[in-house]
Each structure stands twice: as structure tokens, then as C-alpha cells.
Image (cartoon, grey):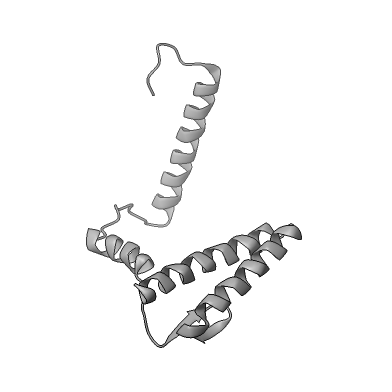
């Protein structure tokens, strides 16, 4: 922290952090745990990012409604858009967001198919 004076709120935050650290260290010592840093290859991290962006194109496309043929893709997108709007009207925003995400994914696949 950078400050000329430590305010009451800052003191409380610092003290709470120190209390939690002491509690964690006592727990670690009691259970013989030696904290270590995570050793993860950057390629593993990047691979997971690229997998999410990759759209596999085949004769069938997996959707939340099951597998569909490529020629049914546009109709499925329209159907999901209607379900999304209905869910939003019913104030089921989480469900509407899931439909929105699926629509985006299918539109990306459709774009890749049509070129």
C-alpha cells in the first residue's frame, strides 16, 4: 500500500490479513503442508484458451438441443433466439444468457461453414 498515513480502514484490512496468514501458517504446520507455487507450463494455459475459440466443423453440430445437421443450423439459431427472448420476458435471465451464449457459438460455427 502507498500512503502517508494508515487510516482505520487500512489498519483493519492489514490486521485481518495478518490474522488470516497466521491461521493458515498454523494449519499448514499442524498438517505438515509446505506451500509451493503453481508450476504450470504456459502452453497448457494457452491451449485451454485456444480450445474454447476452436470450432470443429463436421456433418453434425452439437447444440444444447442435441446434435443437428448443418442445414438445420439457421433454424436452430432462430429457435434459440425465440427461447432466449421468452426466457428474458419471464425474467429468467440466467437461462436467457445460456441461450445467448449458445447462439453466439452456433453463429460462429455457421460463419465458418459458410465461409
Image quarter (top left, top right, bottom left or bottom right) of the C terminus: bottom left
* Position of 19 relative to 112 (above/below): above
Residue 55 visible within the image: no
**Where is residue 19 shown, x and y percent of the image?**
49, 35
Compared with 73, 3 (above or below) is above
Image: 34 above or below 73 = above
Residue 104 image point, x, y percent: 49, 64
Along the horizontal axis of the image, is 102 left or right of 52? right
Q: Quadrant of residue 39?
A: bottom left
**Is 39 displayed left or right of 96 in the figure?**
left
Q: Which residue: 37% across, 20% down?
A: 2
Q: Say which of 47 and 21 sits in front.
A: 47
Q: Looking at the picture, how far across and down is residue 68, in whole percent? A: 51, 85
Residue 32 or residue 59, whichever sits in front: 59
At 48% from the left and 71% from the top, the residue drawn is 106
75 left or right of 40 in image: right
Residue drawn 59% across the image and 72% down it = 78
Give the residue furthest to the top.
Answer: 4
Residue lying farthest to the right in this orientation: 90
Q: Is residue 29 left or right of residue 20?
A: left
Residue at x 50%, y 22% (from the top left corner) = 11
What quarter of the picture does the N terminus occupy?
top left
The one nearer the camera, 55 or 28, is 55
- Residue 67: x percent and y percent? 51, 86
Q: Is residue 58 visible?
A: yes
The number of callouts visible is 0
Amino acid at each position: 500500500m502507498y500512503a502517508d498515513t494508515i487510516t482505520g480502514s487500512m489498519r483493519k484490512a492489514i490486521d485481518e490479513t495478518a490474522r488470516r496468514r497466521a491461521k493458515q501458517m498454523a494449519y499448514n504446520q499442524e498438517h505438515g503442508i509446505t506451500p509451493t507455487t503453481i508450476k504450470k507450463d504456459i502452453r497448457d494455459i494457452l491451449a485451454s484458451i485456444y480450445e474454447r475459440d476452436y470450432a470443429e466443423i463436421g456433418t453434425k453440430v452439437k447444440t444444447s438441443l442435441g446434435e443437428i445437421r448443418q442445414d438445420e443450423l439457421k433454424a436452430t439459431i432462430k429457435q434459440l433466439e425465440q427461447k432466449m427472448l421468452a426466457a428474458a420476458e419471464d425474467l429468467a435471465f440466467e437461462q436467457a444468457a445460456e441461450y445467448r451464449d449458445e447462439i453466439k457459438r452456433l453463429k460462429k460455427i455457421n460463419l465458418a461453414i459458410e465461409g
